[in-house]
Amino acid sequence: MRHHTRPIKLFLPIMALLLALAPAAYAKPKIVLLATGGTIAGVQPKEGEPGYKSGEVSVDQLIEAVPEIKEIADLTGEQVANIGSQTMTNDVWVKLAQRTNEVLKGDAAGVVITHGTDTLEETGYFLNLVVKSEKPVVLVGSMRPATAISADGPANLYQAVALAASPEAKGRGPLIVINDEIHYAREAQKINTTQLDAFKSPNAGPAGIFIGGKPHFLLPNDEPHTTKSPFSVDGVKAESLPRVEVVYSYANFGRDSIDFLVQKGVKGIVLAGVGDGNTTDEALEGLADAAKKGIAVVRSTRTGSGIVARNMEVDDDKLGLIASNELNPQKSRVLLMLALTQTKDPKKLQEIFNTY
Ligand code: DGL
């Protein structure tokens, strides 16, 4: 009998060690869902009927609707807002960014943000500039409300959580998940009003796709973002962000709306210009006058893709204007607002637009 004692003595501590390690080895990544509303949380008057109200379903109901998520992550939810994203504000952005940063400082592996699709790309780009973590931040929306036949929200949410839990998503900046695709928030744009494939990344193409519920990346993200961005929301109050507005150009566009904004005391104006950030002679004169008064004026384009190049068709040097480069008007507004917290110098602002 005595010769059995030693193996048993060794066996017991090894078993105890294995049992202690087991929960850690099998622990699922902790993901925090920050809900803001949108169609993904939208409800129809009656199942199958057209028309709906976004931002009706609570974060807990969203999570309960996709029980499969429990198999891939330890998910907890917080309601940051419950709105249609057409009513998104700087206030919600600052709150959301500050909470994202707080959560990512803790033991969460990543954050998923549910959001309406209308301004999803703007929120994503704002976070791209002010989140201070390499951990995954995934924004997700849907085109059909939660109560629709064949709602796309549950599958999108499952994929968003899988992406946020994936080590491959680290260090890429905020990502957008919709319709089986992954987009870099900086590149993504809503290009359709109602269809499932409403998002494209017109200049770069999708960052990746989902295969069997798993993310597969196609493109790296070489742009400086998050921890490499100089912008921050630490201690920032939304009302302290400078007012930046967008004006839209078309045939026969005059300067009245530009002059009105100058009178209103805006700090920045973004032109949603025709073609290569162009506009009528009258509007261009209005913009140059605004720039002379110290208002930052960025030329972007309403075309939906391409690059607005400096001094191509418009003499930016002479008129004191800034070219938006790859950013569409709504994203130019986001960058200009944050950039104006650091400088008003058009040359430095141009460098910022060349970089982020
Ligand atoms: N108004 C919309 C919003 O919340 C609904 C569109 C959507 O979420 O897809 O952005």
Image: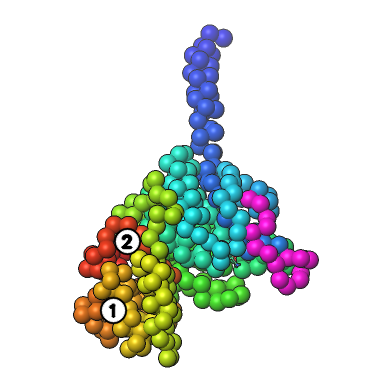
Would you call the spot at circle 2 few (<14 residues within 10 Å), some (14-19), or many (20 or more)?
A: some
The answer to whether the residue bearing label 2 lies less than 8 angstroms from the nearest atom of ligand 1 is no
- Residue designated by label 1: 288
Total residue callouts: 2
Would you call the spot at circle 1 few (<14 residues within 10 Å), some (14-19), or many (20 or more)?
A: many
Q: Tell which of 278 and 214 is nearer to you.
A: 278
Where does the magenta region start and end? 44-59
Q: Element at badge 1? A: helix
Q: Where's ligand 1: which quadrant?
A: bottom right
The picture places residue 312, in percent across and down from the top left corner, at 26, 84
Q: Element at badge 2? A: loop
Q: Tell which of 269 and 204 is nearer to you.
A: 269
Q: Is residue 38 magenta?
A: no
The picture places residue 132, in percent across and down from the top left corner, at 38, 49
Magenta stretch, overall SS: loop
Residue found 42% across the figure and 91% down from its top: 252
Foreground mark, 2 or 1, reads 1
Q: Is residue 259 left or right of residue 181?
A: left
Residue found 27% across the figure and 84% down from its top: 314
| Residue 340 numbered mark, or none | 2
The answer to whether residue 25 shows anywhere in this view is yes
Residue type indicated by callout 2: Leu
Q: Where is residue 327, by image quadrant? A: bottom left
| Residue 72 numbered mark, or none | none
Q: Nearer the N terminus, badge 2 or badge 1?
A: 1
The picture places residue 73, in percent across and down from the top left corner, at 56, 46
Disc 2, disc 1: CB below 8 Å? no
The picture places residue 244, in percent across and down from the top left corner, at 40, 66
Q: Is residue 229 left or right of residue 13?
A: left
